[in-house]
Amino acid sequence: MKLKLLIATLLTAATASSMAASTTYNLDPTHTFPSFEADHMGLSVWRGKFNKTSGTVTLDPVAKTGSLNVKIEADSVDFGLDAMNKHAKDDTMFNVAKYPTMTYTSKSFKFDGDKLVGVEGELTMMGVTKPVALKVDKFKCIMHPRYKKEACGADATAEFKRSDFGLNIGLPNFSPEVKLAIQIEAIKAD
């Protein structure tokens, strides 16, 4: 009986310790911008980004676990050309009136030793949800000199087919592959 009580106490302490190591961070919308590259008839590569994001990251480096939830405002798409921005928002492309947001929700974090190297998750775009894996090329946490709080940042990449999400404009003359790059900075929540 004493052994069972000791094991239960140790498991409870281990669980509490593990939970205590988990930290939540709020995405900094002034430093988090998903950007993308897409083919333009094989002639050039169009590049754009989304200017409005929000979300959270929860990280437990001891347990090597975490979660990422990102909300992207579709009408903040920015190609650097007003005519293209207007076209991208209409019902032939992102259809922002019907699908105002996109989301990325993680399923798991991948570590190589103590280094965060990937995130498995799902992208929801235009009402379709598909798995998209992020490769984390850079990750770092510091005490932010301005906010006086811990801040973490990452640079991640992924590739997917836009046609998997119903974004079929220009096919087959335009390649369906899209390269995604996202810089993320997040500040420790209070």
Image (spheres, rainbow, N blue to C red):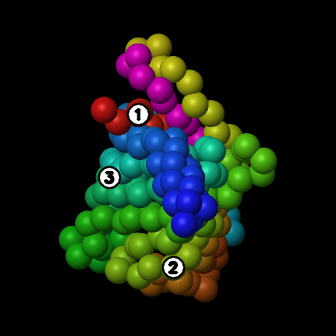
What amino acid type is highlighted by mark number 3? Ser
Local crowd size for mark 2, using a 10 Å CA cut-off: few (<14), some (14–19), many (≥20): some
Which disc number belongs to residue 130?
A: 2
* Left/right of residue 165 with respect to residue 189 in the rendered view: right
Nearer to me, 122 or 52: 122
Residue 90 picture location, percent across and down: 29, 71
In this view, 107 is above or below 72 = below
Please tell me which residue is depicted at 77% across the width and 51% down the height of the picture. 112
Q: Which circle's residue, 3 or 2, is located before the other in the chain? A: 3
Upstream in the sequence, badge 1 or badge 2? Answer: 2
87 on left or right of 133 = left
Tag 2: amino acid? Lys
Q: Which residue is mark 1?
A: 188
Q: How many marks?
A: 3
Q: CA distance from mark 1 to mark 2?
A: 29 Å
- In magenta segment, residue 149: yes
- What secondary structure prevails in the magenta region? strand
Residue bearing mark 3:
76
